[in-house]
Amino acid sequence: MSKTALITGILGQDGPYLAKLLLEKGYKVYGMIRRYSNPNFENLNYVGITNKVDYLEGDMTDESSIINIVKNIRPDEIYNLAAQSFVGSSWQQARLTAEINAIGVLSLLNAIKFFSPTTKFYQASTSEMFGIEHTSGYQDENTCFHPRSPYGVSKVYAYWITVNYRESYNLFTSNGILFNHESPIRGIQFVTRKITDGIARIKLGLAKDLHLGNMEPRRDWGFAGDYVEAMYLMLQQEKPDDYVVGTGENYSIKEFAEKAFGYAGISDWEKYVVIDPKYKRPAEVPNLKSRPEKAMKALGWKPKVSFDELVKMMVDADLERLSKK
């Protein structure tokens, strides 16, 4: 019999790439989505698997719906990708961020504990948990957490409750501490996609400028399609564990923008960028850079798409998308 997997947050960026990977490996894939009058399957359409997934209605803020799903399907694996994942919004929606990102994970773990204890669980953790902590300029599994946003704080709770249930109840629960990962289906509010979409609009005469905030923070950017492979590999191990996943390189937002403008053939890019104070965050994380040796050695994982290839992929995709419109 084929394995079964439940993916929460399947309508986001990572869900479609992960679902496609699991389907290719013969899994039966369930996707949990909230009740919508008109669900947006655009990202699943992009990877061509919309009609290959079974959809179940549930909500991370409604424990009863989570319990019903886990109890009814008892999946072999659960990948929790659902989150209020936009860091900037977490200050304005701090309570909602906590309810989804922290308490929602507790609900999932309790559902597994009581109704499907053999289910393997993946928790999507984030480099934002590290905040301003680092060791010689990088972060790895031994780096302390010092989150600088309600989003980061909520994810620290989710990380430790995942560890706690592993240690307390002998459940197979693993955290993937993923550094920034992007793709052509990244949400438009995230800075990388905002940049490539804005550049495509400027190139095609649909916009005159691009409004951004602080361009100095440095991030470790990889391709989402590579990172879902690491998620899968974590749940194939003999024992559960926690892993940092990244490229080991980082670039500033300014460098990302300059390279993206260059791929679009715009050399005098700075005249199109407007630094807008409304995008300034109450607290900033200046430097995130992974040290992913553990994942590379233990999982046999490594990123395939380079930074340059990622930027070009995203620019090309937005130019094509907007050209069609």
Image (spheres, rainbow, N blue to C red):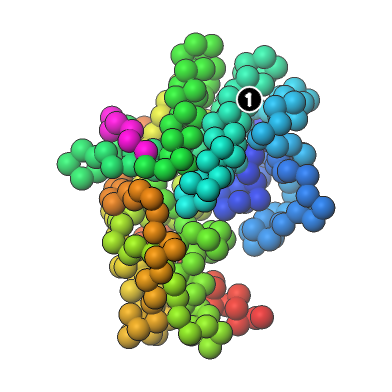
Q: Main secondary structure of the magenta part?
A: loop
Q: Residue at x 48, y 46 (%)?
A: 91
In this picture, is 6 found above or below 86? above
Q: Position of residue 282 (x, y in %)?
A: 38, 50
Work out whether residue 165 can be spotted: yes
Instruction: From the viewer's perspective, tell me whether residue 227 is left or right of residue 24.
Output: left
Report helix, strand or loop for mark 1: helix
Q: Position of residue 133 (x, y in %)?
A: 26, 38
Work out whether residue 48 can be spotted: no
Q: Position of residue 281 (x, y in %)?
A: 40, 54
Residue extending farthest left:
136
Q: Looking at the image, how many numbered discs can be counted on the residues?
A: 1
Instruction: From the viewer's perspective, tell me whether residue 221 is left or right of residue 199.
Output: left
Residue range in magenta is 142-147
Q: Is residue 260 magenta?
A: no
Q: Position of residue 135 (x, y in %)?
A: 21, 38
Quarter of the image that includes the N terminus:
top right
Q: Residue at x 30, y 68 (%)?
A: 255
Residue extending farthest bottom:
205
Q: Callout 1, which amino acid?
A: Ser
Q: Residue at x 56, y 59 (%)?
A: 187
Q: Residue at x 49, y 23 (%)?
A: 161
Quarter of the image that includes the C terminus:
bottom right
Q: Residues within 10 Å of mark 1 (few under 14, many from 20)?
A: many
In this picture, is 161 found above or below 33? above
Q: Which residue is mark 1?
A: 107
Instruction: From the viewer's perspective, tell me whether residue 143 is left or right of residue 52.
Output: left
In this picture, is 262 found above or below 293? below
Q: Is residue 144 magenta?
A: yes
Using the image as rendered, state which of residue 209 and residue 119 is in the foreground: 209
In this picture, is 139 found above or below 267? above
